[in-house]
Amino acid sequence: MARIEHVALWTPDIERLAGFYSSYLGATVGPKYINASKGFASRFLTFDNGARLELMQTSTLHPVGYEPGAQRMGLTHLAFALGEQSRVDQLTETLRQAGFPIADGPRRTGDGYYESVVLDPDGNRIELTV
């Protein structure tokens, strides 16, 4: 059986993004890996259920940037299940108060999900759901 081992995101600031996922979504931040000869650094974040997110930074490549919250082909959002509707409401409000943009919700979608969509510090769409 296949399973997703991790999802990787380029970021201009590993520490800022790691702080967001650690503070608001409970990720455990792993040690920083640096390959100076390739201009590469990364950190793995691990969530309680074993899911992992790799945050990567480069000084030699020029990843394509998108407008914050842009809908685009390919990976478009990361979804985090919080277990209860009230937790979606609470975290959405906490993030709003902290100055993070709320792109949508909280709301019940046509397919039955209860969700909100917030933007992380890099403008990635983060779906908070039950």
Image (tube, rainbow, N blue to C red):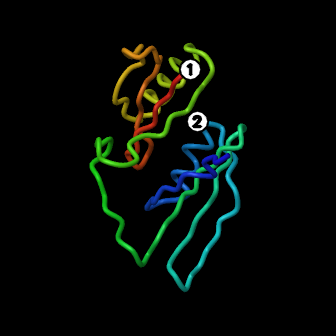
Q: Amino acid at mark 2?
A: Tyr
Question: Gap in Å between the C-alphas at discs 1 and 2?
Answer: 15 Å
The residue nearer to you, when weighing 6 against 104, is 6
Left or right of residue 100, residue 38 in this image: right
Name the residue located 43 percent from the left edge and 28 percent from the top edge: 96
Left or right of residue 51, residue 123 in this image: left
Whichever of labels 1 and 2 marks the residue nearer the N terminus, that label is 2
Name the residue located 54 percent from the left edge and 44 percent from the top edge: 20
- Which image quadrant for residue 24? top right
Residue 94 is situated, as x and y percent measured from the top left of the image, at: 51, 26
**Which residue reaches farthest bottom?**
37
Vertical side of 117 occupied by 86: above or below? above
Left or right of residue 18, residue 106 in this image: left
Kind of element beneath mark 1: loop
Viewer-side label of 1, 2: 1
Are there few (<14), some (14-19), or many (20+) residues within 10 Å of tag 1? some
Residue 98 is situated, as x and y percent measured from the top left of the image, at: 47, 33
Q: Amino acid at mark 1?
A: Val
Instruction: From the image, tell me which residue sits under label 2.
Output: 24
Name the residue located 47 percent from the left edge and 22 percent from the top edge: 93
The residue nearer to you, when weighing 62 against 49, is 49
Name the residue located 42 percent from the left edge and 13 percent from the top edge: 108
Residue 66 is situated, as x and y percent measured from the top left of the image, at: 29, 53
Are there few (<14), some (14-19), or many (20+) residues within 10 Å of tag 2? few
Vertical side of 93 occupied by 39: above or below? below
Residue 69 is situated, as x and y percent measured from the top left of the image, at: 32, 41
Q: Which mark is residue 53?
A: none
Task: Tell me the quadrant of the picture where the C terminus can be found.
Answer: top right
- Which image quadrant for residue 71? top left
Vertical side of 42 occupied by 50: above or below? above
Instruction: From the image, tell me which residue sits under label 1.
Output: 130
